[in-house]
Amino acid sequence: MADDSADPFPMLGSVYRVSGSKFNQLSCKVADTKLNAEQTGESKVIPIAWCSPKSSSNAWSHPNVIQNLTKRGNSGSGLVNNNNNLQEKSNSPNTLNGSENGVSNNSNLPPQSVKSPTPEKGLYSSDDEIFDSESDIVFDSDDDFSLDDTDSDTGEKSHEGRMKSKWFRSFFDILNKLKVEEINSQAIRLHCPACQGGTGAIDWYQGLQPLLNHSRTVKVRRVRLHRAFAETLEEECSRRGASLLMVGEAHGLWEGLDKKVKDHEIVWPPMVVIMNTKYEQDENENWTGMGNQELLDCFSDYAALKARHSYGPRGHRGMSVLIFEVSTAGYLEAVRLHKHFKEQGRDRQAWDRCKNPFVPGGKRQLYGYLATREDLDIFNKHSGGKSKLKFEMRSYQEMVESKIKHINDDGQKLDIFKEKIAKEQLKSKVFADTLCQVTERLRKTTVESRVVRERTKEYHQQNKEEMDAQETFFLDKMQIIHQAIAAKEDEFAKSQQAKREMICAVGDSSVKEDDNHIMEKISSFIKSQDKDMRQFEAERDDILKINEEKKLALKKKYWQELVELEKELENELSELMNKYTLSQSQEENRQQ
């Protein structure tokens, strides 16, 4: 383990491996400049200040080492180093951690020239490149670094152990000597102890907060070492009560103005004092001046309601007031008049400085300003009773500011309502136009429907007449058939009756010959005929019954087909109406 007293700012030769003639003289200057902190006493962090080369601080507590190197440049004697030892020391842990005094052994290095810096940029003209194009920088990884005093059981390092590690000891020794106010100050400038001996070692951080942010956000070199330093710094600041934002907290915190706005009292109702309104003295040496209407006419561009004048023992005192409306608008008008006087250079201060109340030409110059309590007390000095000007002192926030906010809110609402009204009016206009179009279409549709109904009625009447004619025709045919059937039945009945009469007549003529035999034949014939007629009547009834059933079935089928036909007509008409209703709705939607 390296010596804990090692200088935390090692020689540049232990960090950079350089080929060329620029390194050795720079190493010589650093060797001449660096002193052991243990030999010279304690050091502390202070703001930027130039110090002599004999200063006892190290590079982590003072920004002066590099500036001194810059000042001294190429002056001083060179030191002798061995080039063979340079390669070993640049790769060895001792060179990174520093020797006992934090300075590498450079007694054997040959003298080399160092690049002279410019006064404007200091020693380093860029971030990390101070050597020629042949420079070879040695980069270290996290595996090359470790903290001392690691707990053997947990492998974790205690807070005190981290503070006393070879990397952080010098930094926290300096930090422990500072007060909380100094820790919170942005005046201190610090190096990052986790960057010592590597890239970023010479970077300055103005205060602890930028240093903490750097340690928490670095992602390239010595990440674990930087994180350990950040945790240690946060813990130490927390223990000491220093205000330090932890990484991850919101950094964009701002404090604005106080919410409470300072208020003041104003004269209410709003008034503007007009000075120099007297005119001349009369024979009694009393002053005369402007009248009320004259004063109102003089300021007719402003919405003043009334004018009053102050009178004393000697008449008109030359002091008048314009009284404005008891509202926010009245106050704004009074302020506008006040600003007009001020822009013209005729305000209160101008009146107080006025020595000559007249302008070239002999006219009196009027002055004006917002009235205060003192002004109105002066105005009422010689007034009493009803002649005294009445007023009161009110809060500006209450009478003006809040009312203006309400006016603004009302104005915004009014604008919103106006927009809504405009939209509603536009909609109403569209609806009215649409209604007119729909009404016109309805009128045309009504006319067309009436025409269609009339035509349908005529067509129906024609069909009815035709059907009636056909019905008459078929009824006539059926009547003829019925008449033919009736005639045939009559003829059939007559033929049967004729046969019976003929049998009876034959029987009468042959009665004398064989009465019994003849009577039997006649009786047998009559019985046979009656039997046939009864059978005829029964079969006739069956035929008529079957015929009636067929007629009934035919009529039933006819009416069913007629009903189906009417239903089909209803469906077709409904589809037709729906078709045109849908097309009209689509056309209305396109027009809207």
Image (cartoon, rainbow, N blue to C red):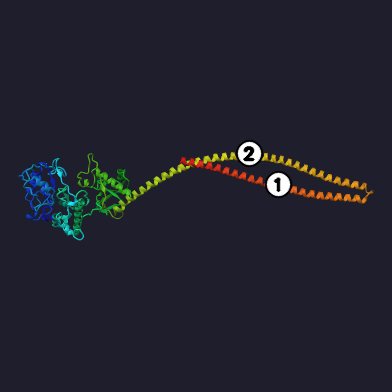
| SS of the residue under disc 2 | helix
- Choose top left, top right, bottom left or bottom right for residue 178: bottom left
> What residue would you read off at disc 1?
550
Q: Which of marks 2 and 1 is nearer the N terminus?
A: 2
- Depth check, mark 2 against mark 1: the one in front is 1
Q: Position of residue 156 (x, y in %)?
A: 20, 58
Q: Position of residue 437 (x, y in %)?
A: 50, 40
Identify which amino acid the numbered label 1 is placed on: Lys
Q: Where is residue 182 in the image (x, y as percent from the top left)?
A: 15, 55
> What residue would you read off at disc 2?
459
Most extreme residue toward the left, as rendered? Answer: 77
Q: Distance between the residues labelled 2 and 1?
A: 32 Å
- Side of 441 where 562 appears, left or right: right
Q: Which of 39 and 413 is in front in this view?
A: 39
Identify which amino acid the numbered label 2 is placed on: Tyr
- Quadrant for the N terminus in the image: bottom left
Mark 1 residue crowding within 10 angstroms, few (<14) / some (14–19) / many (20+):
few
